[in-house]
Amino acid sequence: MPRAYVGNFLGPQGPKGDKGDTGAQGPKGATGATGPQGLKGDTGATGPAGATGPAGQNGATGSTGPKGDTGQRGSQWYSGTGITGTSSTATVFSGSGVTSALVGDYYLNTSTGYVYRCTVSGAASVAKWVYGGSIKGPTGAQGQTGPTGDTGPQGAKGDTGATGPQGPTGPSGQSGATGPTGAKGDTGQRGSQWYSGTGITGTSTTATIFSGSGVTSALIGDYYLNTSTGYVYRCTVAGSASAAKWVYAGNIKGATGAKGATGATGATAPSIYAQHGKCRNHAAFHYLKDN
């Protein structure tokens, strides 16, 4: 059947209506085909750390590395009396005796108990020290007397002491009984003897041999008198006349005495002439003969 145009039934567009309520979600559609890869997006924030995984197996031991450099020695203590005082200012003590001090070393003065710390390293003429304190505390109160200990074992015998001064003489003891007579001793050397003659002469005090003395066996201490001069000699070397020596010891002759007084007149002798006549020689002969 032929259609005839009868006109436009649509009127002008009306105003926009209110938004309708959201309809119920429709069923999930089928997955569409994969589209082309889009552009790389920005890196997202770091997620939280994952849990620590189990430890892996130990790897093989590596080769030994090269030896490292020798490290600096540690702090050392020194002692003596070369560092003194209580100054906290770092000071050089060239008489300390420490030849190679390091910072942090310590020094104890064994006389005072003071302790010093090294602040500048070096030899005695360079290193510096400061007073650090004293290891000596104040003197404590005297403690109570302890109980007497057990007697210890006897010690070894000590060395002999020096001889003491001589003590006063003790009282005389009682006389002991007479002992038995001892055996006869050997014949002793004879005592000093005197000799005389004219074989030893002079006044020399130098020991001299007089081979003509006539003394065949002189001993030291024997004496010899020269009967002509009165000189006395002493034997100093024993021996025969050719070996013994003598020295002049003095003179037994005193000085000449004073002249004595004149003696009294003797009695008159009898006349010899009356008996024998005038022969004087004959008379003298008979006088001497008879008297």
Image (tube, rainbow, N blue to C red):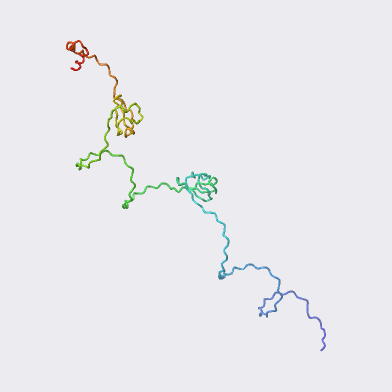
Q: Position of residue 130 (x, y in %)?
A: 51, 46
Q: Left or right? Give the position of 235 relative to 86.
A: left
- Is residue 240 or residue 136 the one in the foreground? 240
Q: Position of residue 85 (x, y in %)?
A: 49, 43
Compared with residue 1, is residue 142 higher up or lower down, i.e. above or below? above
Q: Left or right? Give the position of 128 relative to 268.
A: right
Query: Outermost residue toward the left?
Result: 275
Q: Position of residue 275 (x, y in %)?
A: 17, 12
Q: Position of residue 81 (x, y in %)?
A: 47, 45
Q: Quadrant of the N terminus?
A: bottom right
Compared with residue 126, is residue 20 higher up or lower down, i.e. above or below? below
- Is residue 247 or residue 211 the one in the foreground? 211
The quarter of the displayed image where residue 242 is located: top left
The quarter of the displayed image where residue 169 is located: top left
Compared with residue 265, is residue 185 higher up or lower down, i.e. above or below? below
Q: Left or right? Give the position of 273 relative to 95.
A: left
